[in-house]
Amino acid sequence: MDSRQPIRIPTRDVVRVLALIFGFYISVRLLWIAHPVVFLFFLGVLFGLPLAQGADWFEKRKVPRALGVAIILTVFLGLLTAGADGIAPILRAQSKELQQRLPEALDKIDAWLGHRASGVFGILFNEESSDTLRTAAAQRSAPNDSTLAPVVVTDSAGADTLKAAASGIVRKPATRADTVAVGGNLRREITKQMSGAQHSFLRVLTSTLAVSGAFMLVLFIAAYIGVDPALYHGGLLELFPARQRGRAAIMLAGIATTLRRWLVTQLIAMLVIGAVTTVFLFVIHVKAALPLGILAGILKFIPIVGSIFAAIPAIAMAFIDSPHKALVVAVGYFVIQFVENHL
């Protein structure tokens, strides 16, 4: 006789699990739809943590927290405005040059790859693909090649054919190899990939008004957190059961300390990367060194991928001068990031 009893799952537990799954799905969907706002709120909280620490320093010296936050923000905005005014003319000119010369650089890389289809790049493909690429490269290097074909005049209607043969040009029919090009239109492909990788948040920030609005929103959130962090800390603790609030308070304090230290370290790294990259590009005479250096510093905030995205336009601009300089820029970017990550 089988002593095993069938497993019975209460209907209440099934409904609870399904409700949790459905609630999780709805939460993820809402976060995805509202991720620009969530991201701005996260930035506001992130910058509000060191602002609150600065307000604590003023409070210990009998300065009201609100006044301390106002002083910190005023100094920050003043330094930002002074720095922007100082480099604005150079940055504007070099940014315009970068915008104009970058398509030219991509086209030059595209042509360089195409001319070397029968060389090293052919090894990277299989035998059939390599033969096809060699044929395409030969036809691109001699687009006016022609073949002579014997012509036999069988009647008076062949006179035109004889004249064509006498001129010495009878073109071969187009084949699939004629359309093969290594890299294709590199500018189009990179633009397509970059536009596909853009999120709606980045598209929203294409206008000056949206950038200003987002910046002010982050500052307001940071200011509110800096003036009264205990209020929001207590509100978060209310989300936990009463018996767990002590442990939750310790956990939240640890998270705040870690985020504050990470942000300060990241800002210092961004400044160092931006300055070193600008000097490096300027020394080797890469065009638009200042905006490329600023871009490298800003994208340092994005782990791993940001450094790669920052290197692409710099390598392309160096390629305008020579492939050797582009290689030097690529190695330089790698060394700068490697040293910064291991310090």
Image (spheres, rainbow, N blue to C red):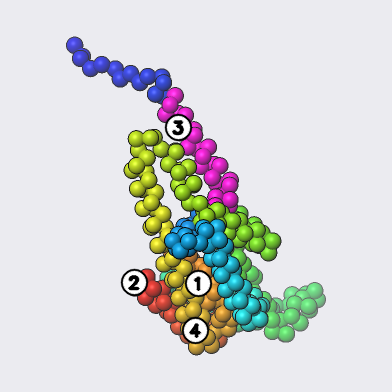
Horizontal arrangement in the rendering, residue 196 relative to residue 7 (left or right): right
Q: Earlier in the sequence, mark 4 or mark 2?
A: 4
Residue located 37% across and 75% down the image: 339
Reply yes or no: does residue 221 show up in magenta.
no
The span from disc 3 to disc 2 (Cα, nearest Å) is: 43 Å
- Find disc 2 in the rendering and name its residue: 342
Residue 49 visible? The answer is: yes
Residue tagged 1: 297
Quadrant assignment for the N terminus: top left
Residue 97 placement: quadrant? bottom right
Q: CA distance from mark 3 to mark 1?
A: 42 Å
Magenta: main secondary structure equals helix
25 over 111 or under it: above or below:
above
The image position of residue 225, as x and y in percent, is: 51, 53
Residue 229 at what x, y percent from top left?
Answer: 48, 51
Which label is found at residue 279? Answer: 4
Quick one: quadrant of the C terminus?
bottom left
Please state which of residues 23 and 39 is positioned toward the viewer in this rendering: 39
Please give the range of residues in magenta.
15-42
Dot 4 or dot 3: first in sequence order is 3
Marks 4 and 3 in Cβ contact (< 8 Å): no
Identity of the amino acid at label 4? Val
Between the residue at mark 4 and the residue at mark 3, the CA separation in whole angstroms equals: 54 Å
